[in-house]
Amino acid sequence: MTGSAIIAPLTTPIGRKAIAELVVQRILDLVRRGHLTAGERLPPERELAVQLNVSRPTVREALRALSILGVLEIRHGGGVYVTSLDEDDLLNPLDFYVSLNADNLAELLDARISYEPMIAGLAVHHLGDAALDRLQFLVDEQRMHPEDAELFHDTDAEFHKTIAEASDNTFLARIAKLLQALGETGRREFLQRTEIRMRSVEDHGVIVTALRARDVAATQHAMRQHMVNVRSALREVKGV
């Protein structure tokens, strides 16, 4: 867009006691309500400051925070725009936090030990034959290419995504996808080891067998054991 968006809901002043966090919340609310959409340009900083009845430094601080969150893109000399709001953009700050140290990744995997079995149990009665065949295909691909770390990464992501989407609960599936997406850098690092990847491949095979049997308890047990093994792999490599 060439012009600035007109943001009517911002015309009511917030008040002098407001701080940058309130400006952040106001702009996020506009995005949620659809008053600001992907790719849309915000009014100039000076205009925003007048509309919000806050100082320009306060507006600048809020815009920078929203840029870090992946909600806004600040183009030098070109204005401020709402990003595409793609999941990758919005997950970047959380992924960065997870990647800061191995302890954060360890806590993420601890969360998945509890969460993934629940999702898998819900998927048992919703996975059709085509989806089960796809899961088996992914496992077979992993077995046939034990040295291909990139192939394992991609098929592993699809494996867990397929199960999550079969939970028949959009909200739970999105949380599972979020947890899967986070820690990407850290997982890539310790999954470079062939023996660790192959351990996961065998775990995947056990999970598929339990899913085909429509056995909720066995599926949950297999998924939990898989995530425990992944957590143990991190401990082997990083010592956490």
Image: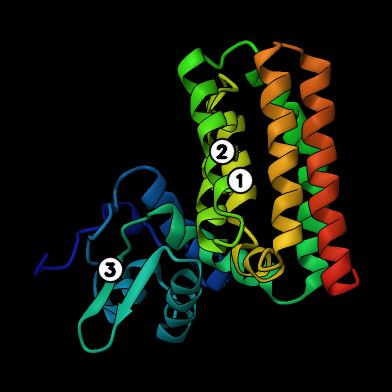
In terms of image quadrants, where is residue 234?
bottom right
- Residue 173: x and y in percent read 57, 33
- Residue 101: x and y in percent read 76, 76
Give the residue number, with chain letter if any, for mark 3.
81
Q: Is residue 143 left or right of residue 63?
A: right
Q: Amino acid at mark 1?
A: Arg
State the residue in front, 227 or 118.
Answer: 227
Nearest to N terminus: mark 3 or mark 2: 3
Q: What residue sits 55% from the left and 30% below the top?
A: 135
In terms of image quadrants, where is residue 168?
top right
Q: Amino acid at mark 2?
A: Asp
Q: Secondary structure at mark 3?
A: strand
Give the residue number, with chain letter if any, for mark 2.
140
Q: Quick check: 55 above or below 149?
A: below
Q: Amino acid at mark 3?
A: Tyr
User: Badge 1: few (under 14), some or many (20 or more) residues near its Cα, within 10 Å?
Assistant: some
